[in-house]
Amino acid sequence: MYKLYYWPSIQCRGEYVRLALEEAGAEYIDVARRSGRGMGIKAMQKFLDDEKLAETPYAPPFLKAGKLVIGQTANILMYLGQRHGLAPRHDEGRIWVNQLQLTVADFVTEIHDTHHPIAGSLYYHQQKAEARRRTKNFRTERMPKFLGYFEQVLAAHGGRFMAGNRLSYADLSAFQLIAGLRYAFPKAMKKQEPDYPGLVDLHDRIAARPNIAAYLASKRRIAFNQDGIFRYYPELDG
Amino acid sequence: MYKLYYWPSIQCRGEYVRLALEEAGAEYIDVARRSGRGMGIKAMQKFLDDEKLAETPYAPPFLKAGKLVIGQTANILMYLGQRHGLAPRHDEGRIWVNQLQLTVADFVTEIHDTHHPIAGSLYYHQQKAEARRRTKNFRTERMPKFLGYFEQVLAAHGGRFMAGNRLSYADLSAFQLIAGLRYAFPKAMKKQEPDYPGLVDLHDRIAARPNIAAYLASKRRIAFNQDGIFRYYPELDG
């Protein structure tokens, strides 16, 4: 039984972990979303404030697997991928999937910074002018560059999955990117999607996988909202 | 014999790999800094443009180890760390050092964005006002948060190295952070350094290691400069 520690009302970086756990059919508790003893945001904060804990995470998400506490999304996914068949068994394949996930992470940071280009501790309305400028560049340069890269990778691996014939956690992350970008930038995505038929197809195939479909239809899947990394501000959508 | 592919005139993300290779005493060619057949920036670009290469990297740095091409700094370091004794042997330790390096990577991205808060493709002078605003937040909130975290981690592991008794690549990266922040923010660092005696001591001990000292004194170490991630703009130093 895993314990996932992440903010209870947003998908954000925790969602990549949730998707992997759900696809794997792993048993887990989403700690901050539960109430009661040892649950809730307080339980998460306790870990982050524990100066005696040597392997303390810098920030959520982190996963408790037995005595092991693992922080950083890509790190958690590498651990889960190996244990649940969501990554190739050979070293080369694992290194490749980790590389993909780290590129997803870079993309996610840039997506976050579209609406928070100055500081995470300021509100969006306090950095709206800068957000508009940054997002214009994001939509026209960065989004096509990242999506074009993943599309090319997918094609080079035969079109089914990004590491070849078998699903990996990087494919689940690609699904989340497409879903999130559609929520945040509906106009821009409508325009750009035809350039990425492989990714759109991957998104649809992931969404239809039994465990993922069940997850997406459940209350465990938090809806996209205006507190997450993917946010819909019409003025940023061009 | 490794081949490292990275921009020839800057430290940036490639430097974390160079430091690991140098500490390990590994033989490597810094391809883009050499001239001749199969060398230079062209050789690097060739990899990035190769659509037939299935495991194509998104961006430099990448490392060629035999037939394996590994992209993403933290991914390269994980590979080198395991092969050259720059990471613990047990899984828990390796996961921990990877987690630290990913937190270093997050910090490095934020350092980069102090002078490029709007777009990497625009010049600094085209985003100077935004840079001033972002950097003020960086100096007062983000820098203390990251440095305070690494200081706490170091203390919790006995004060010598961040993963316990033995050096890991995360310690080499911490050295680079301190060196770079001193270059980019001399005033802010002078003020803040007393709060991080452990990190300063770690920096000094790393700099004095024979292989690292030899590297730093050699021409292989590119000097900090105004094209890198660590840049000195007095107006951003408060």
Image (spheres, coloured by chain):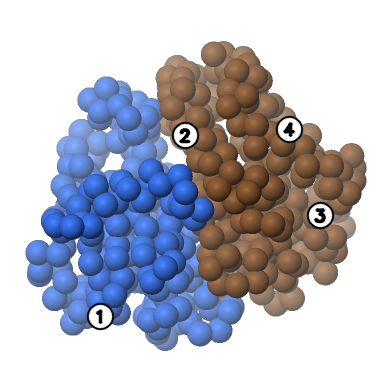
Chain colours: A blue, B brown
User: Distance of mark 4 from mark 3, alpha carbons?
Assistant: 18 Å
C-alpha distance separating marks 4 and 1: 49 Å
Residue B3 screen position, x and y as percent = 77, 63
Mark 2 in CB contact with mark 3 (< 8 angstroms): no
Q: Are marks 2 and 4 in one subunit?
A: yes
Q: CA distance from mark 2 to mark 3?
A: 29 Å
Q: Which residue is mark 3?
A: B22
Q: Nearer the viewer, mark 4 or mark 3?
A: 3
The CA distance from mark 1 to mark 3 is 43 Å
Marks 4 and 3 on same chain: yes
Classify B5 as above or below B137: below
Q: Which mark is residue B145?
A: 2
Where's residue A95, x and y in %?
56, 71
Res. A169 image quadrant: bottom left
The subunit letter for the residue under badge 4 reads B
Disc 1 crowd, CA 10 A, few/some/many (<14, 14-19, 20+): few
Residue A63 disc label: none
Tell me the number on the disc at residue A25: 1
